[in-house]
Amino acid sequence: MFSLELSETHKMIRDMARQFARDEVSPSSIERDIKGEFPTEIVKKMGELGFLGMMVQPEWGGSGMDALSYVLAMEEISAVDASVGVIMSVNNSLVNWGLDTYGTPEQKEKFLKPLATGIVHGAFCLSEPEAGSDATQQHTVAEQTEGGWIINGTKNWITNGTTASTYLVMAQTDRALKHKGITCFIIPRNSPGFEPGLKEDKLGIRSSDTCSIGLTNVFVPDENVLGGVGTGFKIAMESLNGGRIGIAAQALGIAKGAFDAALLYSTQRKAFGKPISELQAIQMKLADMATKIEAARLLVYKAAYLKDQHVSYVKEAAQAKLMASTVSVQVALEAIQIHGGYGYVREYLVERYLRDAKVTEIYEGTSEIQHIVIARSLLKEM
Ligand code: CAA
């Protein structure tokens, strides 16, 4: 039975993440955003604290926690810096999960362990210049050769793209089979012909790195095929189901950060002879913001709960992401409105929440794609 009651362990993880976010992530977050600087030291510390392999068993270097713990930590860290949140989310949901679920013991030893311990971090390469929402249309091609595969193509919008060490790359191995002819390859960064491009200059989540990747005659040995030839699209979609819970938690964190800032500001800023928190116009906004955040939180925790129960969570993950990302943009906008002119300048942080929130409606499946996933699930359930 789904309950919002957190266990002592869950509370401990949430508090640990909150403290880490406050003490380690917050101090340099404005500077990193302005400079677009990757949080190298913070990512290292996240590894030490177990945040980069949260749901991987200790045998493979992880913390052996559940999805709810992951969501709680993601929410706290993203409330302070969503760039750090997405680095953590991609590593946990899109890279570790696939390796953990479909990897051979040798692949886990070689690739998962360093990723889960946080010695290195990873990236997930599905999107292409002409295959974003329409992800089955992969143009990256893998041709069989002696002992392995030769891969050619281009990947786009790759989070952790310039800094990762291990990449999961989807490529077409048999075009006639359409999405059933897509295979997932594990590619180390130093493979000849594997070339991450320049870091994109983004509106938000500016200190995370996003880039395109060129693959020119990249040789990948057979032992680096993940989960069997032709199973790449399935792995990608299943990874994204969990990824969507992670991004929903990131969006929830952004909303919480923006709301907390607006609530505090409303008690400090005076207008018409009293704190603006006593004005009904502001109270209406605060009440709406808090209610929307709570509704989103329920969906996010429920999706994580279902994942932990090992039952289907496809629809619920999409609902959680749709709701939390929408709420996060709305709440960030209202937080700016409550701050007035001060909300429009960098000094007050809330403008960053809006810039960071927007991407949660785009990556790991746009809001429009989430509608499709939800509707198809509803029809399937009939
Ligand atoms: N979970 C499990 N399987 C799924 C699935 C899901 N959520 N969605 C689709 N599938 C399966 C289907 O069951 C089907 O399998 P079978 O043929 O075996 O039955 C197969 O995938 C193809 O599905 P459809 O026939 O429904 O294909 P479609 O082309 O009509 O729609 C889609 C597919 C749902 C639109 C899918 O392409 C999609 O999710 N697109 C969005 C892609 C996305 O989220 N990209 C983000 C990339 S990662 C990123 O953002 C970068 C980053 O670094 C953070």
Image (cartoon, rainbow, N blue to C red):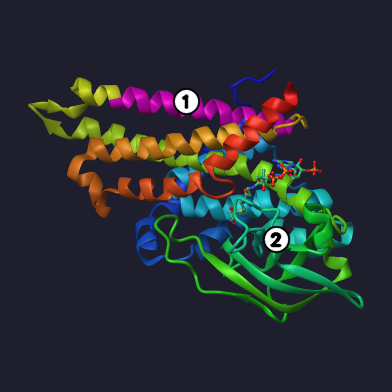
* In the image, farthest residue toward the front: 176
Q: Left or right: 1 with respect to 108?
A: left
Q: Which amino acid does label 2 sit on?
A: Gln
Q: Mark 2 points at which residue?
A: 138
Residue 370 percent coordinates (x, y) = 59, 38
Work out how far the residue at label 1 is from the one at label 2, CA to CA, in angstroms. Answer: 38 Å
Name which quarter of the figure residue 130 lies in. bottom right
Describe the element under mark 1 as helix, strand or loop.
Answer: helix
Pointer 2 local density, CA inside 10 Å: few below 14, some 14–19, many at least 20: many
Q: Nearer the viewer, residue 45 or 80?
A: 80
Could you tell me which quadrant the N terminus lies in? Answer: top right
Is 299 part of what is drawn in magenta? yes
Residue that sits furthest to the top in the current view = 1
Q: Label 1 is placed on what type of residue?
A: Glu
- Range of residues picked out in magenta: 285-308
Residue in view at x 50 percent, y 60 percent: 208
Q: Where is residue 312 in the image (x, y as percent from the top left)?
A: 75, 31
Q: Is residue 69 found left or right of 209 in the rendered image?
A: right
Neighbourhood count class around disc 1 (C-alpha, 10 Å): few under 14, some 14–19, many 20 upward: some
Is residue 91 positioned above or below 373 on the image? below
Q: Is residue 11 visible?
A: no
The residue that disc 1 covers is 294
- Which type of secondary structure does the marked residue at label 2 adopt? loop
Q: Position of residue 276 (x, y in %)?
A: 18, 28
- Quarter occupied by residue 191: bottom right
| Residue at (79, 55) in percent of width and height | 178
Eyeballing the image, is 96 above or below 378? Answer: below
Question: Residue at coordinates 58% horizontally, 64% vertically from top-left?
Answer: 129
Residue 370 in view (yes/no)? yes
Q: Is residue 164 magenta?
A: no
